[in-house]
Image (cartoon, coloured by chain):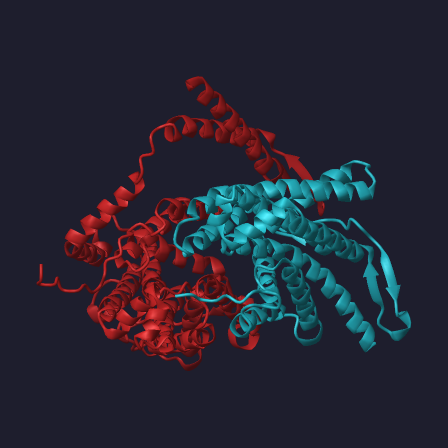
Amino acid sequence: MEKKFFQTSIKDSLFTGLIALALFGPIVGLRTVAKNEVLEVHPKWFIVLIIVIVCAVGRFLTNLYIYNRDQKTGIQSSIGKSISNFLDTKGYQIALTAIIFSVIFPFLPFTDRYLMDIAIMMLTYIMLGWGLNIVIGLAGLLDLGYVAFYAVGAYSYALFAIHFGWSFWICLPIAGIFAAMFGVLLGFPVLRLRGDYLAIVTLAFGEMIRILLLNWYQLTKGPDGLTGIPRPSFFGLPFKSFPDEGEQTFHTFFGIEYDPMQRIIFLYYLILVLALITNLFTIKIRRLPIGRAWEALREDEIACKSLGVNPRNTKLTAFAIGAMFGGFAGSFFATRQAFISPESFTFIESAIIVAIVVLGGMGSQTGVVLATVFLIGLIEVFRDFESYRMIAFGGAMVLIMIFRPRGILATRKPTITLEKSSSK
Amino acid sequence: MDTAYFLQQLINGLTLGSVYGLIAIGYTMVYGIIGMINFAHGDIFMVGAFIALISFILFALTSIALPIVLLLTLLIAMVFTACYGWTVEKLAYKPLRKSFRLAPLISALGMSIVLQNYVQAAQGARIKTLQPVIQGGFTFMEDTGFTVSLSYLQIFIVLVTIILMAIFTLLITKTALGRAQRACEQDRTMTALMGINVDRTISITFIIGSSLASVAGMMFVMYYGVIDFYIGFLAGIKAFTAAVLGGIGSVPGAMLGGLLIGLIEVFWSGYISIEYKDIAAFTVLVVVLIFFPTGFLGKPDIEKV
C-alpha cells in the first residue's frame, strides 16, 4: 500500500515535470532576441531545467506531505475567521488606532519621503477601493472599468485647473460631478446586464475612455498628456520656496522654514481626509434606505422588484456615487502628479482596484485597507522586478480566490437583523 | 475604384475575421460548458503566437520545405499551447468550480495578468518581428486605379480556418466526446451520473479551445509579422465580442461572429476612422449585449426564480 502510493507519487511528479517542460521549454527556454532586426533564439536550458526540477520535486513533496494526510479542512479559513472575529469584537478600537496612527504617521521619526509617497499611494488606492466597494461590495455589480471614472476625474480637474485657473477646492466637486455623470452614462445601458456580461461591458467602457483620451488630441494632448497642472494650496497659501513679490506662501505665513516635505505632508492629509470621508459616507449610507436597497439588490434582484425597489434607480445611484468618489480620487491624483497621461489609466489599474475590493472581502471596509496594504506592499517589495511583481500580484489573486474565495475578511455581517421573537 | 476598395476591405476583413473566429470558439465553448468567461483566453492566444514565432525562427535555420514547416509549426503551437490551456484550467478554475459566481472570473483575471507578465519576463517587453513566411499573391482589377491584392497568406489563413472548423464541427456533432460535451453543457450532475467523466470533458474543452487559439496566434504572427506580450488583451476582447455576437455557447455562432467583427473592424478603419478602430468592436459589444443579448445563434437565457 505504502509502496504503491510512493510509486504513483513518483509517476505523478514525473508527469508534472513533463508538463512543466512543455510549458516553460519554449517560452522560457528559447528566448527570442532581436539582432540586426532579425530575431535569434538564445537557448536558456539551465533555467528551464531548474524550473522543471522544482515543479516535479514540489509536486512530489506536496503529494507526500499534504494530500497524504487526512483532509484538514479550513486551516486557511480559520485564520481569516479569527481575524474577522477579532475585528468584530475590537473593531472600533482598531479603527480608532489605525486612524490615530495615520494621523501622526507623517511626524513619526522613521517616516521619510519614500514612506510618505507609499503612504499617499496606498491611501489613494484605499479611497478608490472604498469607492468601488459601493459598486461591487454593496450593489454587487462587478465593474472592471472603474479606472475610467478615475481618469474622468483627473482629466476634468486638470482641464478646469489649467484653462480656467480654478482652485483645487472648486475643481474637486466639479470633477466628482463629471465622474458621476459618466457613471450614470455607463450605468444606463448596462442596467439589464448581470455578472460576467456586466464586467466585460464595463471593461470595454474603460478602454473606450482611454482610447478617446489617447486620440482626442485637441482636448487631452493625446499620449503626450497634460502638464503643468496646478498644485493644491493650503487655503490659498501655495507651497513655494521662492514666493513672488508680495505673495504669501505657507512658510512665510506661519513664519517657518521652507521644506519640500510640507507639501507632501499636506497632500497626505488631503488624501487621508478624502478617504475617510468616503468611508464615513459608505458606513452611513449603508443604514439608509438606499444602502439597504443596494444590498438587497445584490442578494436577489427579483425579490427586490417584487417588493417595490426600483432596480434601475438603485443601480444608477450606486454607479454614480461610486464614480463620484473615483472622480475625487482622480482629481487628487492629478494635483499630486501635476502630470497626467492615458498611460496612468490602463486596464491594469482597474484590475488592481477590483483585486483590492474582492480580496478584502466584498463589502468589508476594513478588508479594503488590509488588501491594499497587502497588495500594494507586495508590488512595492518587488518594485525592482517590474514584471515579476505583476506575476506575484496575479498569482496572489488566483491563490486568494482558491483558498478564500470570499476575500480575506469573508464574514458577511447582516446590516440589519430581526428582533428575536418573544414567543419561545 | 470604389468597388475595388470595397473588395480589398472585404478580403482583409474575412482574413481578420477568421483569426477572431478561431479565438472566439474557445470563449464560447468554455462559456457553454462551465458558464464562465475565460478571461485568460486572449493571453493563451498570445502564448500560441509566441510559440509559433519561436518555431518559425527555429525552422528558418533548417532547410525544410515550406509546407512541412507550416504543418509542423501548426502542430507544435497547438500541442504546447494546449498544455497552457490545460494547466490554467487545472490550477485556476477547477478548484473554483463550486465557488461563488464571480470567483472564476477574478481568478481568470489574475491568470491573465500572470501570463502576460510571464511572457514579458521570459521573452522581453519589446515587440518581435517575423520575416514574412509566405510571400506573393494574386492581384486583380488593376485597371481601376486601385489594385486589389489577395495574398497566398490570406488564402492560407482562410483555408486552414475552414478545414479546422469542418474537423471541429464533425468532432462536436458526431463523436462520443462531442456528445459528452453537449451533455455537460446541459446538466453536469446528470452527466456525471450517466458515467461521463465531467472533469476530463472540461479539460478537453480547454485543450481544444487553446489549440484553436494557438492556430489563431500563428495566423496573427504570420499576417501582421509583429507581436508583443500585450496582443492577447485586445484580441481577447474582440473575440469575446464575436462570441457574444454569434450567440455565446454556439460554435457556428462564434465563427460567424468572428467574421462579422473582422469585417466591421476593417470597414470601420477603411471608411470611418483608423484611430478609433478599437472603439468599433467595443461599441458592437455594448450594443449587442444591451439590445440583442442572445446573439444570432444563441439560446435565450431564461431567468428562473
Side (left or right) of A265 relative to A35: left
Counting from the top left corner in percent of width and height, residue A229 is at 42, 71
Q: In the picture, which chain is red?
A: A
Side (left or right) of A407 relative to B281: left
- Residue sitting at x 15%, y 52%: A89
Quarter of the rendering occupied by the N terminus of chain A: top left
Side (left or right) of B253 relative to A280: right
Residue at the front extreme, as displayed: B194
Residue at the top extreme, as displayed: A3
Q: Quadrant of residue B235?
A: bottom right
Most foreground residue, A360 or A188 = A188
Whether residue B139 is visible here, answered yes or no, is yes
- Residue sitting at x 49%, y 64%: A197
Tag count in the figure? 0
Quarter of the rendering occupied by the C terminus of chain A: bottom left
Whether residue A33 is visible here, answered yes or no, is no
Q: Is residue A6 above or below residue B44?
A: above
Q: Is residue B10 above or below residue A111?
A: below
Residue at the bottom extreme, as displayed: A164
Most foreground residue, B11 or A348 = B11
Q: Is residue A393 above or below residue B243?
A: above
Q: In the picture, which chain is cyan?
A: B
Most foreground residue, A205 or A209 = A205
Residue at the right extreme, as displayed: B143
Counting from the top left corner in percent of width and height, residue B69 is at 77, 41
Counting from the top left corner in percent of width and height, residue B58 is at 72, 38
Counting from the top left corner in percent of width and height, residue A361 is at 32, 54
- Residue sitting at x 35%, y 52%: A359
